[in-house]
Amino acid sequence: MGKFLAAMAIALATTLSAQAQTKELVVAAFGGAYTDALKKNIARFEKDNDVKVTFVPASGADGLAKAMAKEIDVVHADMAWAYRGEAQGAFEKLDPNIVTNLDKLYPKARFSEYGVITNFGEYGIAYNPKEVSPAPSSWLDLWDAKYDGAVSTAGFDAANIELLVLMAKLNGGNEDNIDPGFKKMAELGKHITVFYSQHPQLLDLFRNNEVVIARWLRGRVDWANKQGVSLGFAVPKEGAIGLVSTVHVVKGRPNTELAQKFVNHLLSVDSQTAYASDLGYTPARAGLDLKGVKVPYGEEVVGSLLIADWKKIVPKMDAWKERWEKEVVAR
C-alpha cells in the first residue's frame, strides 16, 4: 500500500508540474469568424511557446473593462477604444525587440507605441445598380435629393465619425472645428428614414428596395451578393473610410513577454494572410503574396484610407454623440 501511495504521489506531482509549465494566455477578440481566423495558426504558436491561448469574446467598452480589471493578456479594439485604453494606462508599450514584425507593416498601421493595427477594411458606398445610375463617385452622392427616404447609414459609429470629420474638412473645418461637419450631416439626416444598426437589417432594406444607396463595408456588399441581393460597391473619390482592428498588450499581467510574442504572431505572414483569405480584410503587413485572394491590397490602398486623428476625437466623443442624436437623428 505504501508503494502504491508513493507511486500515486509521484504521478500527481508530475501532472501538476506539467500543468504548471503550460501557461495560459487570455486574448479578448471580436468573436465569430474573426476569432476563427485567429485560431487558424494558433497551434504552432502554442507549441513553440508552451502556452494555451484562450479566446474570450469582447469588444469596445467590454474589452477595455476586462483590460482595466486585468482579466486578459491581449485585447483587440478599434481606434476609439485604443486611445481610451492608452489614456487610462491600460496597455504596455510594444517592444520592437520582441514584436520584430513591426517594421514589416505599413506606416499607417503603427499609430501608437501602445498598439498596432492588424488589418484594414473599407467603408464605401453600396448601391442598387438598377436604381442608382451612374455609379456613385463621391461621398456627397449620399446627399442627392433624388434618394430622399432611400438612403441610409448607421448610427454614431466609428465610420460615421470618420464621415463627420470628412464633411468638416470638406467645408472648412477639422477635428478641432467640427461644426461644419455636423451642419452637413444634419442635411443628410433629413433624407434618412432608417439609421441601420445591424448588417442583416440593411440587407433587408436593400432587398425590399426601401434603401437603394448606403454607407457600407466592401465585405458586406460581397456578402449581400451571395445572399441574392445584387449590389454594387463604389470607392468615393475622396477615399474609402478605414475600418481598423487594433491589438494591445494589457499592462500588469504576468505573461507580458508571451503577450508581446502573440502580437508578433498576429503580424506574421501566415496570420496576416488569413485576415485576407478568411475575412476579406486588407492586411497591415507589406509584401505579402495574395495571389488568388480578392481583397484590395498594397501601399496605395492603405495610404488612401480615410483615418482621422482619433487622439483628438476620443476626448470629445461623448459630447459629439449627444450632438449627433439631437442634430442628425432627431432633425
Image: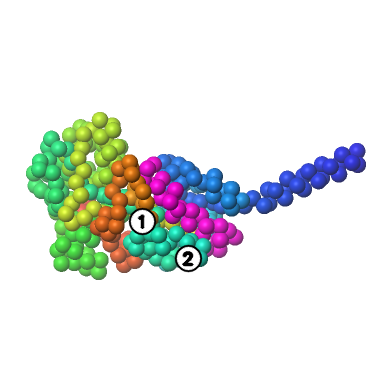
Left or right: 58 in relation to 146: right
What crowding class fits label 2: few (fewer than 14 Cα within 10 Å), some (14-19), or many (20 or more)?
few
Residue indicated by mark 2: 96
Q: Residue at x 35, y 60 (%)?
A: 106
What's the CA distance linking mark 1 and mark 2?
A: 17 Å
- 271 inside magenta stretch: yes
Q: Position of residue 287 (x, y in %)?
A: 36, 54
Left or right: 51 in relation to 218: right
Q: Residue at x 30, y 37 (%)?
A: 223
For the record, the magenta segment spans 251-280
Q: Residue at x 53, y 54 (%)?
A: 72
Q: Secondary structure at mark 1?
A: loop
> Height in image: 202 above or below 315?
above
Q: Secondary structure at mark 2?
A: loop
Q: Position of residue 114 (x, y in %)?
A: 44, 64
Q: Position of residue 139 (x, y in %)?
A: 17, 52
Residue indicated by mark 1: 286
Magenta stretch, main secondary structure, is helix
Please state which amino acid type lies under the numbered disc 1.
Answer: Ala
